[in-house]
Image: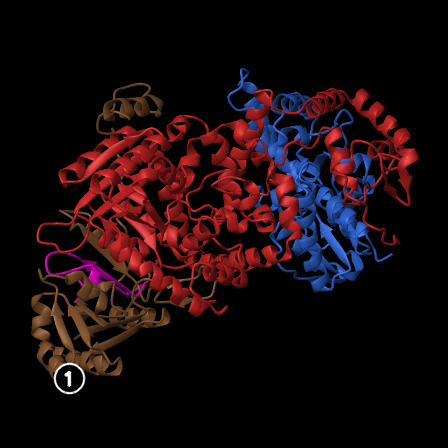
Chain colours: A blue, B red, C brown
Amino acid sequence: MRVALFVPCYVDQINPEVGVSVVRVLRRLGVEVIYPEGQTCCGQPAFNSGFFDEARTIGRRFLDVFEGERFDYIVCPSGSCTTMVSHYYPFVFENQALPDDRERAEALGHRVREFSDFVVNVLGVKDLGASHAGRAVFHTGCHQRRELGILNEPRDLLQNVSGLELLEWENEELCCGFGGMFSVKMPDVSTAMADEKIAALEKSGADTVISCDSSCLMHLGGRLRRTGHDTRVLHLAQILDSDGR
Amino acid sequence: METSKPARRRDTEDRRREGLESKVEGFNERGRKAVRDRKLHDSISLFTNKTLTGRNAQLGAHPDAPELRERAYRTKQETMANLDYYLSQMADAIEERGGNVFFADDGEDVVRYVGDLARRCGAKILAKSKSMATEEIELNHRLEEDYADLGLEIVETDLGEWIAQLAGETPSHIVGPILHMNKERITEILSGVSDEDLPPDVESLAAFARKRLREKFLNADIGITGANFGVAETGTICTVTNEGNARLVTSVPPVHVVVMGIEKVIPKFEDLSTFVQLLSRSGTGQKITVYTNFITGPRGEGELDGAEEFHLILMDNGRSKLLGTEYEEALYCIRCGSCLNVCPVYRQTGGHAYGSTYSGPIGAVITPLLKGDKEAKDLPYASSLCGACTETCPVGIPLHDLLLKLRNRQVEEGMAGRAESLMFKGFERTMKSPVAYKAGAKVGRLMQKPFAKDGSIEGAPGIRGWTDFRELAPLAEKSFRELWKEGI
Amino acid sequence: MADRTKFLESIRHRTRRGRYKPTKSPDSVWTPGVDRPGREEIEDPPARFIEELEALGGHGERAESLEEARDYVLDLAREREAELLVRWDVGYLDELAADEPLREAGVEVALWRDLPGLREIAARADIGLSTGTWAIAETGSLVLEHGPGRGRSVTLLPPTYVAILPADRVLRAVPEAIQKYARGTLPANVCFHTGPSRSGDIEMSLVVGMHGPGDVHVILIG
């Protein structure tokens, strides 16, 4: 099994440790990991703000970079960036002068898998022998929940982490309020959304929030720290990579 | 671990200078006031949570739910593709039953038709049942103004809608017009039109309203309703209510006027089975509402109640512009309000923050489509694109995809701010070349140095929309790609 | 003022179909498959009807005969201290033969006929009495067909409302009831009436009997 790693730009620059954990977990499972170094960003920030031309330029570049590699799957530690490639590349390339871009996007889109989805559904692994002491809630990013429909996989993986107590929290399906540029354009509303999640988090008694999306975690984590909480925010890969240290 | 920092003053001016915030009061400004109003927040939660629980129990439990949704979508698709045919069929059916049909290009046409009708009938009291189409064209207000000489008394008869009318407010939710008001406020409003102070209990308030409105029903000269659905084949108007007011205004007054958006037509009577089930289950979490009423033309021969005169106004008001475009699906909406209830943005702000007749995700989609992008510039951005709206929509409108298209339309029309356009041009240049990307990251690391404190970035220009509210993690010392090169 | 022809023509040009050809009857009207009534197994429709109606705060009753129903109406009139009852002018309610006993009990009975001040009578009545064409088990709904002698106001204006119909008129589900009107000429008004009139507009608190009757009784005969 050979996997091309797609590391979202903010993971690359702000949370590189998440990428490192992904590599370690995949290698432990006997997967050959390559990292196409020409990759940058999937273009989602531009796309979500309505700048489709800019998103298409970046998208074409993404297709160029990954089409030039040999792999079985592209694996990405973000439900949101996975969705950009698998769902929204075909969307943004629709009705374009060059119809083959859409076909290219479709073809590549079928081979992109979100990290937990890949581990559980492609590799068939649910127990990684990880351990992590703590009480945690899991936040499913909205793209992961609704576009990708990956709901049980992260839970299956977390159930098998020794020492970890996975808790339920209220209105789990509500968005954390990040929404890319939404968090900056509508900061008051976005923050109110985060605060509702944080209230539910407090009620649950969890000391950690786990997610497959570092972007949601950046938002929730940023607000948690601003409001004086010491709740930890961790990517699923970091938990699976941990051995209880 | 980080200790808490005092929240900084939110400096709107700074963000405006950065060009990220619009200069007019827009969604975020109205939303800011709304999110600080805890009473409002409680009222919204009460309504949305209760309604959603019902919706999930009724629609989630319905064995045919996915099939119904698919069928609704396809029926609407078919209808829109042949809309002129179905409208014409409906008009014929109604005329055959002795009703009158009027085609209105816009609100102006509707106002004139209803006003002239009122003049001809010598009408004084017009009793209305809740109708979003008439809200959209501000029918009440404009009739009172344009036909001031008639001294018309136009009364909303839905309890919530009447209270909103008395307060001079617009509905804040398609289904729950005054969900933003608490009992105390309602007591104040109703006491204002009563001879005595009313006690703040729901029963007394409702009893007062019942008595007042009963007089209006019995003395109304014209009854005005909207239509939840109109059947092309039979000319039947279907109204769906719980209080019985739509049934009263169509049974008692001698004249019945229906104001119906052209998109409300469905081909056959049996199609109602799909739509009635979806609307009540999705909108209020009921299997069926108390009064699901089917009116076909004026009263029949020998009948002693029901309107003697029946008028159907088919209103376009911008709708037909959407036909055959990538936005056509927005016309499939049956106004159940479910997308409002699940929307995490609506749940924070309520309906008035949208500043438009229709709020929530569907409002953010159809307001710019019907009124023009300039009239509702910020509404397509009033969403985190979480997709809960699309997931819940009983007729399968891809609401959040339409919001994305509307954002793009604004960009294409050159409506995006200069700062933002420049930012994304720069973003494009950076991201299309790994060399530029790496260089950018390097510059970022240098530039963040003066702003990095205790593991957070503070006070850097251009990012205050973020940092006024949340901590911002700095760029890591080494990026993933550097770590990869060094070997993991 | 919009002209019908122009209005429809402009719409046609905008529809997907209208671009290529003039509209006639659509080539393939998408016909929804006939609903499978009773997909949810309802073994005893009258029992389910009563269960659903009661859950909504209405009262469902099963009576052996019209005599039993008559007694129910009499008791109810006494209990509600009714002074005036208005009823549909239909044969089935003549058969009920409740008018005389009601009058003897001091309750004035008015029939929905061409009388002066009919609307005021209905508005003043304490009880409205009608039959129902069908009932729907799944939802606890009555299906009311209006026409001569079968006034809408009777079911709407009095605070207490009673409907009497044979138990074999109970259908299983909403699609089945709608199907009954899918062919042939529709009456000017058909209503699916389900339980007491209600409103939740004030703080989601349930108000019963908002504009229509809050006290609803349905008696199934047989």
Quadrant (top left, top right, bottom left, bottom right) of the N terminus of chain B:
bottom right
Give left or right: position of A38 versus C117: right
The spot of residue B55 in percent (x, y) is 46, 57
The spot of residue B145 in percent (x, y) is 38, 37
Magenta span: C131-153
The residue indicated by pointer 1 is: C105
Label 1 packing within 10 angstroms: few (<14), some (14-19), many (20+) = some
The spot of residue C39 in percent (x, y) is 31, 58
Q: Nearer the viewer, residue C119 or C168?
A: C119
Residue in the image at 36% along x and 43% along y? B72
Q: Is residue C142 magenta?
A: yes
Q: Nearer the viewer, residue A112 or C142?
A: C142
Q: Amino acid at mark 1?
A: Ala
Under circle 1, the secondary element is loop
Quadrant (top left, top right, bottom left, bottom right) of the C terminus of chain B:
top right
Residue in the image at 42% along x and 64% along y? B195
Which chain contains the residue that carries disc 1?
C
- Say if B231 sits above or below A202 in the image: above
Can you see residue B88? yes
Give left or right: position of B104 versus A154: left
Residue in the image at 10% along x and 57% along y? C148
